[in-house]
């Protein structure tokens, strides 16, 4: 009966828009010990930077039954987010444009996945109430101390690539993950084998050298960390490598051979909003705080705030080709109330000054 229930849950998940569902034993001690060892080494090396939350919660992060007492199974879910027509490479090679990581172009995935996971729980409760004793469920989407990639790997949804993201042979890596911690005891799925082989494309193409070795990421050098998680100044030595990337980075995914045939999403809510897939740096730099908050309402980008939005774009404008329009945009923010913004604008203007007069 448990096998049949598991397949029912997969079917209900597909009906709700999930592209894959996996099942993980909450008490897989061997897997837990391996994850705890890796996490401890990563934290000890300081590779988490300012992400202090990664060191909090003790073993709750790696032991699902400690995070949610009574958990016997973790149901892990995957949903594709790649949008057809969002030309990443073209934007990256057009320095006047602003590059936003593909996952953040549309609606905030946290809300959408959490709602769908809860709908799956509601369906489970309704359909299984007469077949099983009462059970409990709790949903998570990057919203609690959960090792999402490791759980998805254990549940057979893919393997951990050398860039530390989850990879799957038919889906690549352009997908979101979410989990249901449940007291139901269901048969686990088997992990899939690693298919990265000798490929080092993600390591070789990282603009800042953040992937130190296979499966070893120094977040302090990662552009996603620098533009999203970092609260203060972006290290000056790394600013030129940001190029026109103003929120996140996809380079390690764009070069990955497994993403050449990555499927596009079925979710209309992930479609780009406010032309974020083709907007210019100058037009986004002109947004005041009210425009930033209103236009990015319901977007994952909004959480960095207007100040860091301007910080990131100032760096990108400093890396852009010199022009009167670029210089004028930067000078308009030179006396901004935020010291953080002023610092990065001053750096950007100095970059252009070092290149000599415009049109020379």
Image: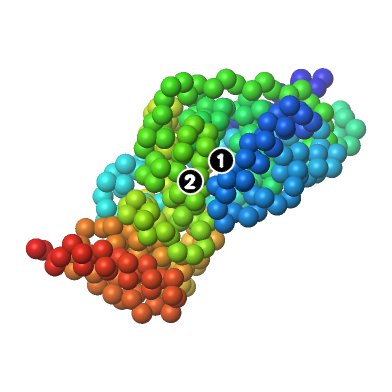
**Residue 285, labelled with which disc?**
none
Q: Are marks 2 and 1 in contact (CB under 8 Å)?
A: yes
In this figure, which residue is indicated by the disc labeled 2?
103
Q: Position of residue 11 (x, y in %)?
A: 66, 28
Q: Is residue 102 visible?
A: no
In this figure, which residue is indicated by the disc labeled 1?
176
As drawn, 340 above or below 155: below
As drawn, 260 above or below 4: below
Q: Residues within 10 Å of mark 2 (few under 14, many from 20)?
A: many
**Quadrant of the image containing the N terminus:** top right
As drawn, 103 above or below 292: above
Q: Quadrant of residue 318?
A: bottom left
Under tag 2, what secondary structure?
helix
| Most foreground residue, 151 or 217 | 217
Q: How is the image coloured?
A: rainbow
In the displayed structure, does residue 350 sit left or right of residue 24? Answer: left
In the displayed structure, does residue 317 sit left or right of residue 34? Answer: left
Q: Residue at x 40, y 66 (%)?
A: 310
């Amino acid at each position: 009966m448990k096998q049949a229930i598991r397949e029912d849950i997969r079917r209900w998940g597909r009906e709700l828009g999930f592209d894959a569902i996996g099942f993980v034993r909450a008490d897989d001690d061997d897997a837990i010990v391996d994850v705890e060892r890796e996490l401890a080494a990563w934290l000890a090396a300081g590779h988490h930077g300012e992400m202090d939350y990664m060191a909090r919660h003790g073993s709750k992060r790696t032991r699902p039954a400690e995070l949610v007492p009574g958990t016997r199974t973790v149901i892990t879910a995957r949903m594709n987010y790649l949008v057809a027509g969002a030309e990443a490479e073209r934007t990256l090679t057009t320095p006047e444009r602003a590059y936003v990581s593909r996952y953040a172009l549309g609606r905030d995935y946290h809300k959408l996945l959490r709602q769908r996971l809860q709908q799956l729980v509601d369906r489970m409760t309704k359909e299984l109430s007469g077949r099983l004793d009462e059970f409990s469920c709790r949903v998570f989407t990057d919203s609690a101390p959960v090792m999402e990639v490791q759980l998805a790997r254990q549940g057979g949804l893919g393997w951990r690539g050398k860039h530390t993201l989850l990879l799957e042979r038919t889906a690549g890596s352009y997908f979101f993950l979410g989990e249901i911690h449940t007291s139901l005891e269901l048969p686990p799925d088997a992990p899939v084998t690693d298919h990265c082989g000798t490929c080092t494309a993600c390591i070789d193409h990282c603009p800042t050298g953040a992937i130190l070795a296979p499966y070893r990421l120094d977040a302090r050098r990662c552009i996603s960390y620098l533009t999203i998680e970092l609260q203060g100044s972006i290290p000056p030595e790394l600013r030129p490598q940001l190029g026109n990337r103003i929120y996140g980075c996809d380079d390690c995914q764009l070069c990955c051979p497994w993403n050449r045939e990555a499927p596009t999403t079925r979710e209309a809510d992930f479609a780009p909003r406010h032309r974020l897939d083709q907007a210019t740096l100058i037009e986004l730099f002109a947004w005041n705080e009210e425009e930033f908050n209103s236009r990015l309402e319901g977007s994952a980008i909004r959480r960095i705030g207007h100040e860091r939005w301007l910080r990131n774009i100032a760096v990108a404008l400093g890396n852009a080709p010199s022009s009167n329009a670029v210089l004028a945009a930067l000078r308009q923010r030179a006396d901004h109330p935020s010291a953080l913004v002023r610092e990065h604008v001053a750096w950007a203007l100095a970059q252009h000054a070092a290149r000599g007069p415009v049109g020379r």
